[in-house]
């Protein structure tokens, strides 16, 4: 099938690479011309394992191409994915849909008859209806479908998730659109991954409910971890104990610094806004967002309590999770400024963080490896669970630090290991080892 994907960020690019690999002819479009120029040369603007190889392969096989010309791209295909951003609006907590609506207007100007517009971006309930209205105003006689098909991939394992989804969700009642979707996802359907056909509104809501449920689990286990610290219990044992209950399951029960990233915070906020708009308040979610914000701010205080002021601190990891370069709403953006304000000398290492435009870290020094960060520092702080941090030579780390203190917000080291090495070790929801 000929497919145009509008928006070539994390979701659009992965979708384009995977669908072209399945044999479709895909054009990925973006309004950012320099991004498109780089992509056409096989240069990937984001860190996502396996993506560069897949993109290069499919450019070579002439299944994948890139363009900043939406009009000519739409001339080439009747299947159009929308994968542009839907960030939190600058004015409030609702989703900023300006990229979506400008995309809808551009589509309306070059629409071919019988096109199928597939909304992959995460959009509040009712947005597909509005997209349909915008396109019909300009094309009252043309036949077209707008369908919802939210994406559930995770950064860091995006290709694996796209190719092996837990489910594909499709919101449409059109038989024609259902047939096209089955052809588009023929590879996933062949492998018998579940595909759910539902209404557009249900499909839009499934995505928000899904991310919000995961955010809730994270906040829940974090609050249990706080209690564990007070009473001397171990949150990992509790996660294991509750996770073995089949009704609960083991996933998303890792205590840590709170959730961040480009999806959970913004989607939870947008769902709260939808609840307000339709007078169905999402009270649980409001508590989740408040709890997460409080946690991120409190963590800076916890570090200060451990080390005192005017000290030298090394930070390992600033991305919101491992295996991505994405810094959007990362806990580090709240924690590091707090330390800098207290005149703490901060050095940072992250294997892949996108360092552009991070004003929050002004005054901190970026280093090229973990050992340079540890050298002469009073405290090492783990903010992201990169695998390379789990494999550090801890004896060497201890020798080059001024004081052997580790604050580990990802629980990547065992208490026993830290005790044997005589570190002062603070982790989340587990007993502190204090060797002072
Ligand atoms: N990042 C994730 O892990 C993830 C996972 C699932 C769903 N989503 C959802 O997918 C959507 C996209 O997210 P993302 O992280 O890929 O965003 P992104 O910011 O990485 O990419 C969006 C791209 O769209 C381009 N764009 C914006 N308006 C355009 C227009 N009119 N024409 C052409 N290009 C345009 C931008 O230049 C940018 O490159 C969001 O709604 C997000 O919530 C994201």
Image (spheres, rainbow, N blue to C red):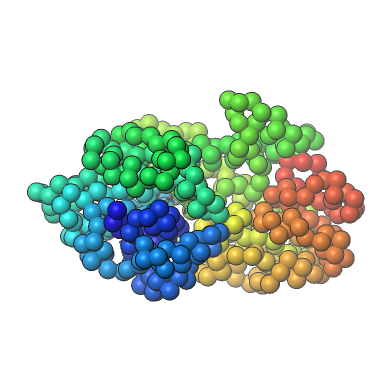
Q: Quadrant of residue 32?
A: bottom left
Q: Nearer the viewer, residue 57 or 150?
A: 57
Q: How many numbered callouts?
A: 0
Give above or below for 119 relative to 389: above
Image quadrant of ligand 1? bottom left
Which residue does the image show at 31% across and 69% down from the upper left?
68
Q: Is residue 205 visible in the rendered structure shown here? A: no
Query: Where residue 299 appears, x then y in whole percent?
Result: 67, 51
Give above or below for 209 relative to 383: above
**Left or right of 68 on screen, residue 395:** right
Give above or below for 403 relative to 161: below
Q: Is residue 385 visible in the rendered structure shown here? A: yes
Which residue does the image show at 63% across and 38% down from the upper left?
253
Q: Quadrant of residue 203?
A: top left
Query: Where residue 328 appears, x then y in whole percent?
Result: 51, 57
**Left or right of 232 on screen, residue 38:** left
Which residue does the image show at 15% across and 52% down from the upper left?
113
As drawn, the residue found furthest toward the left would be 141
Query: Where residue 222 appears, x then y in whole percent?
Result: 65, 40
Which residue does the image show at 22% across and 65% down from the upper left?
71
Q: Nearer the viewer, residue 327 or 286?
A: 327
**Left or right of 388 on screen, residue 211:** left
Query: Where residue 280 appears, x then y in whole percent?
Result: 38, 31
């Amino acid at each position: 099938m000929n497919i145009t994907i509008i928006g070539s960020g994390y979701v659009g690019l992965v979708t384009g690479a995977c669908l072209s690999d399945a044999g479709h002819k895909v054009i990925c479009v973006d309004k950012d011309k320099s991004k498109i120029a780089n992509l056409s040369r096989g240069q990937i603007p984001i860190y996502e394992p396996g993506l560069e190889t897949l993109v290069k392969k499919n450019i070579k096989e002439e299944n994948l191409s890139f363009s900043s010309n939406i009009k000519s791209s739409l001339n080439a295909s009747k299947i159009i994915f929308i994968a542009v951003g839907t960030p939190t609006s600058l004015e409030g907590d609702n989703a900023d849909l300006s990229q979506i609506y400008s995309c809808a207007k551009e589509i309306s100007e070059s629409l071919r008859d019988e096109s199928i517009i597939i909304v992959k971006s995460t959009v509040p309930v009712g947005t597909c209806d509005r997209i349909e209205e915008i396109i019909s105003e300009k094309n009252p006689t043309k036949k077209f479908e707008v369908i919802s098909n939210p994406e559930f991939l995770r950064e860091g394992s995006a290709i694996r998730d796209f190719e092996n989804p837990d489910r594909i969700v499709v919101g449409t009642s059109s038989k024609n659109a259902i047939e096209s979707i089955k052809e588009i996802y023929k590879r996933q359907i062949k492998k018998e991954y579940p595909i759910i056909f539902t209404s557009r509104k249900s499909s839009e809501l499934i995505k928000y409910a899904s991310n919000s449920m995961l955010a809730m689990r994270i906040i829940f286990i974090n609050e249990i971890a706080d209690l564990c610290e007070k009473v001397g219990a171990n949150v990992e044992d509790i996660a294991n104990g509750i996770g073995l209950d089949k009704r609960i399951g083991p996933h998303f029960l890792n205590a840590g610094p709170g959730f961040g990233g480009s999806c959970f915070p913004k989607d939870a906020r947008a769902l709260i806004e939808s609840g307000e708009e339709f007078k169905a308040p999402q009270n649980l979610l409001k508590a989740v967002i408040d709890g997460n914000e409080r946690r991120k701010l409190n963590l800076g205080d916890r570090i200060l309590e451990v080390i005192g002021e005017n000290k030298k601190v090394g930070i390992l990891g600033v991305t919101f999770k491992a295996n991505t370069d994405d810094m959007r709403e990362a806990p580090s953006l709240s924690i590091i400024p707090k330390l800098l304000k207290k005149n703490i000398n901060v050095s940072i290492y992250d294997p892949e963080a996108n360092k552009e435009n991070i004003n929050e870290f002004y005054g901190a020094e970026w280093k090229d490896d973990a050992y340079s960060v540890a050298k002469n520092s009073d405290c090492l702080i783990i903010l992201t669970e990169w695998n390379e941090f789990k494999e550090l030579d801890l004896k060497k780390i201890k020798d080059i630090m001024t004081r052997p203190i580790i604050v580990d917000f990802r629980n990547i080291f065992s208490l026993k290991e830290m005790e044997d090495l005589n570190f002062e070790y603070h982790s989340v929801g587990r007993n502190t080892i204090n060797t002072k």
